[in-house]
Image (spheres, rainbow, N blue to C red):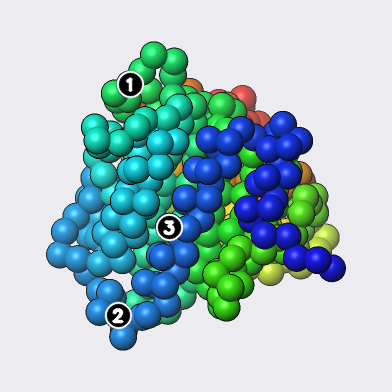
């Protein structure tokens, strides 16, 4: 089969009227930046990029050197292109304006530059997650409130997983598509078009060490999966937990499954663990466009009206039937109160 590069795919999408030239160029810039992040990440111990940066981010988390490097790569790559009005990142408290010496565009880019970075030093897959919004008309100096748009308004979303292969998964709201990096040529090549996630699955992902802290409906749901074929679900289930959302989501995009980061007593006051604007929303768009579902356990993630740039939410995403069962248990429990 003739290989289709990312650039050819983007041109086809433009010809079909599904994206405009500015969005197409923005994706190319982000993809090129992620190739540079892949090079830095793949150096491992030889690149002097492992370990702590000695700094902290807005989340109060110690930054890894590669967190800072990846963030800088994305900011530098997107400063001069003319497609953006501003960027926002997990690693920065406030949005970063486009420098005055460069032209501004009509898009807002949000990203987690290196998600799962606690896995870097043990050589487990990490990734970049990004979300693209339209800059509100007439806004030339976007502030945080201009980013606070529901996930349904995203113009595009994607992630790059830095694993045995470097793989870009992308959606513009017309299906979810996968591109694999041909390292010899340096191009992302279309490897799966219009991905569909099976509605049923026998594989779930959750950090079981938090079990004693979960809400009752989560205890019930996971308890039923663990009961296996002798339990109410009448089948055995398998479990995975990479502690790298991009890696867990990519497994689901590849073979189905369901991922949970539910509320628990430890994080209830923060609203959850994962961030809405640059983790949950882009992943929710990718999953929904592949036929899956994404909720907080109580509502559709992409329907949330954001209240803060670094807002956290519970995340239930993946094969539609399992997300619906787990969500139903939470809604039913709330109604019984
Ligand atoms: P825990 C990585 O820090 C991350 O944000 C996600 O990539 C991942 O799914 C989750 O946190 C892991 O959390 O509590 O299992 O370390």
Disc 2, SS = helix
Mark sitting on residue 47: 2
Please name the residue shown 31% across and 66% down the image.
Answer: 66
Q: Residue 197: tell me if it is visible.
A: no
Tell me which label, 1 or 3, sits earlier in the chain: 3
Please name the residue shown 70% across and 34% down the image.
Answer: 18
Q: Quick one: label 2, few (<14), some, or many (20+) residues within 10 Å? A: few
Q: Does residue 121 lie above or below 292 as drawn?
A: below
Please name the residue shown 64% across and 35% down the image.
Answer: 19
Q: Quick one: label 3, few (<14), some, or many (20+) residues within 10 Å? A: many
| Marks 2, 3: nearer the viewer | 3
Q: Quadrant of the N terminus?
A: bottom right
Left or right, 33 with respect to 55, comes to right
Please name the residue shown 40% across and 36% down the image.
Answer: 82
Tell me which label, 2 or 1, sits earlier in the chain: 2
Q: Pick the residue in front: 280 or 240.
A: 280
Q: Does residue 199 lie above or below 154 as drawn?
A: below
Question: Residue 29, how many percent across, how many down?
Answer: 47, 50
Left or right, 259 with respect to 116, comes to right
Identify residue for label 3. 33
Q: Are marks 1 and 3 in contact (CB under 8 Å)?
A: no
Q: Residue 286: tell me if it is visible.
A: yes
Question: Residue 250, how many percent across, how many down?
Answer: 61, 61
| Marks 2, 1: nearer the viewer | 1
Identify residue for label 1. 140
Question: Residue 263, how many percent across, how many down?
Answer: 46, 44
């Amino acid at each position: 089969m003739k290989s289709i590069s990312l650039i050819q795919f983007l041109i086809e999408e433009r010809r079909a009227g599904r994206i405009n030239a500015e969005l197409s160029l923005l994706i190319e810039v982000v993809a090129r930046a992620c190739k540079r992040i892949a090079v830095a990440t793949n150096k491992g111990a030889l690149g002097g990029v492992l370990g702590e940066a000695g700094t902290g981010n807005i989340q109060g988390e110690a930054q890894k050197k590669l967190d800072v490097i990846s963030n800088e790569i994305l900011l530098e790559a997107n400063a001069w292109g003319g497609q953006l009005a501003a960027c926002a990142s997990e690693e920065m408290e406030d949005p970063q304006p486009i420098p005055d010496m460069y032209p501004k565009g009509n898009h807002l880019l949000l990203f987690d530059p290196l998600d799962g970075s606690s896995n870097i030093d043990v050589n487990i897959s990490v990734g970049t997650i990004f979300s693209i919004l339209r800059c509100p008309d007439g806004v030339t100096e976007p502030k945080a409130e201009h980013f606070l748009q529901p996930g349904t308004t995203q113009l595009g979303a994607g992630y790059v997983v830095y694993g045995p292969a470097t793989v870009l998964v992308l959606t513009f709201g017309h299906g979810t598509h996968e591109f694999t990096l041909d390292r010899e040529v340096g191009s992302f090549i279309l490897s799966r078009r219009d991905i569909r996630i099976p509605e049923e699955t026998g594989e779930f992902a959750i950090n079981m060490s938090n079990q004693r802290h979960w809400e009752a409906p989560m205890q019930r749901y996971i308890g039923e999966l663990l009961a296996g074929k002798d339990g109410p679900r009448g089948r055995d289930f398998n479990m995975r937990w990479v502690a790298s959302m991009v890696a867990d989501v990519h497994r689901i995009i590849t073979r189905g499954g369901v991922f949970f980061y539910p509320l628990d007593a430890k994080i209830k006051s923060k609203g959850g663990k994962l961030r809405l604007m640059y983790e949950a929303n882009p992943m929710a768009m990718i999953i929904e466009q592949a036929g899956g579902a994404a909720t907080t356990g109580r509502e559709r993630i992409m329907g949330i009206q954001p209240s803060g740039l670094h807002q956290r939410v519970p995340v239930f995403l993946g094969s539609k039937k399992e997300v619906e069962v787990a969500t139903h248990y939470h809604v039913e429990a709330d109604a019984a109160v």
